[in-house]
Image (cartoon, rainbow, N blue to C red):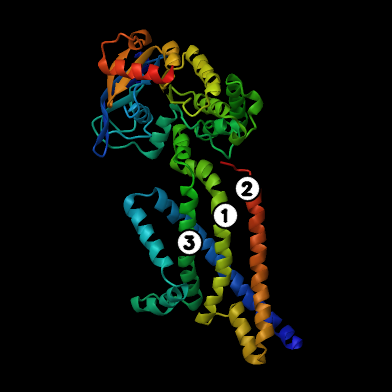
């Protein structure tokens, strides 16, 4: 049994690399899109605020799996054929973006209005106010839910196996298909996911402590 | 153009400014002039539009009609006739010329006392870190807080925070300083230290427009006092005239009487 697992390790490692790659893409892309749209939601003109609000509420109301199947199987109907990998990454990114928008709105919204006004009063432009006054203070509130979201993204990436992508989950299933050793392989898989996410939450706690000197 | 405007003794010219929040008219055709070096104090019952007027001067609030000029230049809008707002950069540059001190201090909690003062100097005035630091230290010294340069706002008392707030505003070398009830959030024993700083700035010739409930201070430090009621200017004059108990202005007399009853 152990021999079979050892034999399968390189294959599992490949799957794990795909899991990490998908997670990284989703986390980075959703961070960029979510922060931009979140700023639009908080500070943008009314039509933009409405558009972001509708986007966020709609996406968050749909199960990720439905979103993924919709992008992969549904979009070709309007002529948009995405390869399975990118269909999965887009769907997960859309979902994560909607979450990042809400984290940003919550974090920025918690900063008192007087901070923006004081920053305006010394002549800072909108971008400068965000960069030097609002974001540094909002960061501490943004971080904990966002890191939680990152671990969700790593776990949620297992869904890409349903589009036939050989990530860690799919690799495990394939090895089980050959060895019929379900229990030890699922335990191994769980341990790998756990190791990644536990490392992330440890890092998060360190970061939070690092920024806790900012008091209100 | 700047030479022509510099020749004029009037620094701030508010004329016919009106503003409504929905159905409530907070400012009704307000007229007010502040000359260079003057200290003008606005008093009046709460809800009379004092703070709103102050916030219009550096365009933290927009206004519906009228004109506000600093050094001959229209604030906030491209011209008095249009309601077309200035662009973001233009507005920021205009605001840098007016300093503002807030009732609730509004120091940046993630920056030290010196850092609070340096932010505008480095990002808006484009000074080097070293130069900004020395200006910050100079002003912290002026407000008696040289030893607190590296303290975070949370480590300072209310009075100390407000003195940093004043230093942050004046370090930008504004043309006019706006003070919005800057001692209202302070414990009584801390009011004196903040007013002493304002007084020393007035002695240096800093032009100031302030809203305050400190009548004794208003009487001693102001060149003129403006009494506002119901969104309009009800009386303007030298402190002795305005604060005289025997004034013929009915509203003012009621205000002062109520004030004396509750504060003295």
Please report, as a chain letter, where disc 1 is located.
A
Q: Which residue is mark 2?
A: A211
Q: Is residue A59 above or below residue A12?
A: above
Viewer can see residue B4: no
SS at circle 2: loop
Residue displayed at 62% across by 90% down: A177
Task: Give the number of callouts.
Answer: 3
Which quarter of the picture shows residue B221?
top left
Viewer-side residue, B217 vs B35: B217
Query: Quick check: B230 left or right of B176?
Result: left
**In the rendered image, which quarter is residue B19 located in?**
top left
N-terminal-most mark, 1 or 2: 1
Disc 3 crowd, CA 10 A, few/some/many (<14, 14-19, 20+): many
**Which dot marks residue A33?**
none
Image coords of residue B66 (percent x, y): 25, 28
Q: What residue do we see at 65% from left, 32% from top? A: B150
Q: Earlier in the sequence, mark 1 or mark 3?
A: 3
User: Distance of mark 3 from mark 2, alpha carbons?
Assistant: 22 Å
Tell me the residue that label 3 is attached to. A99
Q: Nearer the viewer, residue B18 or B234?
A: B234
- Whether the residues at callouts 3 and 2 have beta carbons within 8 Å, the answer is no
Q: On what subunit does the disc labeled 3 rest? A: A
Q: Quarter holding the C terminus of chain A?
A: top right
Is the residue at mark 1 from the same chain as the one at mark 3?
A: yes
Q: Position of residue B181 (x, y in %)?
A: 44, 26
Element marked by disc 3: helix
Residue B149 % position (x, y)? 63, 29
The alpha-carbon separation of the residues under discs 1 and 3 comes to 13 Å
Q: Pointer 1: what residue? A: A143
Q: Is residue B144 above or below residue B92?
A: above
**Which label's residue is closer to the chain start, 3 or 2?**
3
At 33% across and 22% down in the image, what residue appears?
B72
């Amino acid at each position: 049994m152990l021999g079979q697992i050892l034999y399968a390790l390189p294959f599992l490692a490949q799957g794990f690399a795909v899991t990490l790659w998908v997670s990284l893409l989703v986390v980075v892309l959703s961070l960029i899109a979510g922060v931009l749209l979140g700023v639009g939601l908080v500070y943008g003109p009314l039509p933009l605020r409405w558009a972001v609000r509708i986007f966020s509420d709609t996406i968050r109301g749909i199960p990720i799996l439905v979103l993924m199947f919709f992008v992969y199987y549904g979009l070709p109907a309007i002529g948009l054929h995405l390869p399975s990998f990118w269909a999965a990454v887009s769907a997960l990114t859309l979902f994560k973006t909607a979450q990042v928008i809400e984290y940003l709105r919550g974090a920025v919204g918690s900063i008192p209005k007087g901070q923006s006004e004081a920053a305006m009063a010394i002549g800072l432009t909108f971008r400068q106010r965000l960069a030097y006054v609002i974001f540094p203070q909002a960061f501490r509130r943004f971080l904990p839910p966002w890191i939680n979201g990152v671990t969700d993204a790593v776990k949620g990436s297992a869904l890409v196996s349903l589009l036939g992508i050989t990530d860690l989950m799919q690799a495990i299933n394939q090895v089980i298909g050959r060895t019929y050793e379900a229990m030890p392989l699922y335990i191994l898989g769980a341990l790998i996911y756990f190791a990644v996410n536990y490392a992330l939450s440890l890092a998060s706690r360190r970061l939070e402590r690092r920024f806790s000197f900012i008091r209100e | 153009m700047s030479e022509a405007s510099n020749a004029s003794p009037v620094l701030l010219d508010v004329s016919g400014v009106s503003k409504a929040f929905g159905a409530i008219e907070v400012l009704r055709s307000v007229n007010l002039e502040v000359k260079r070096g003057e200290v003008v104090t606005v008093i009046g019952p709460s809800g009379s539009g004092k703070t709103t007027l102050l916030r219009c001067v550096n365009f933290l609030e927009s206004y519906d009609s009228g004109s506000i000029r600093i050094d001959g230049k229209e604030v906030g809008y491209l011209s008095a006739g249009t309601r077309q707002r200035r662009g973001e950069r233009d507005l920021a540059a205009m605001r840098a010329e007016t300093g503002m001190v807030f009732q609730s201090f509004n120091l940046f909690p993630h920056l030290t006392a010196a850092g609070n003062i340096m932010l505008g100097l480095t990002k808006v005035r484009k000074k080097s870190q070293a130069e900004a630091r020395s200006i910050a230290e100079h002003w912290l010294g002026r407000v008696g807080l040289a030893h607190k340069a590296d303290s975070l706002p949370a480590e300072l008392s209310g009075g100390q925070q407000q003195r940093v707030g004043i230093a942050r505003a004046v370090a930008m070398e504004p043309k006019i300083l706006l003070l919005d009830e800057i001692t209202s959030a302070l414990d009584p024993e801390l009011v004196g230290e903040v007013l002493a700083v304002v007084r020393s700035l007035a002695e240096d010739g800093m032009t100031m427009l302030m809203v305050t409930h400190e009548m004794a201070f208003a009487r001693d430090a102001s060149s003129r006092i403006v009494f506002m009621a119901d969104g309009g200017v009800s009386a303007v004059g030298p402190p002795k005239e305005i604060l005289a108990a025997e004034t013929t202005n009915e509203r003012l007399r009621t205000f002062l009487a109520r004030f004396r009853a509750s504060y003295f």
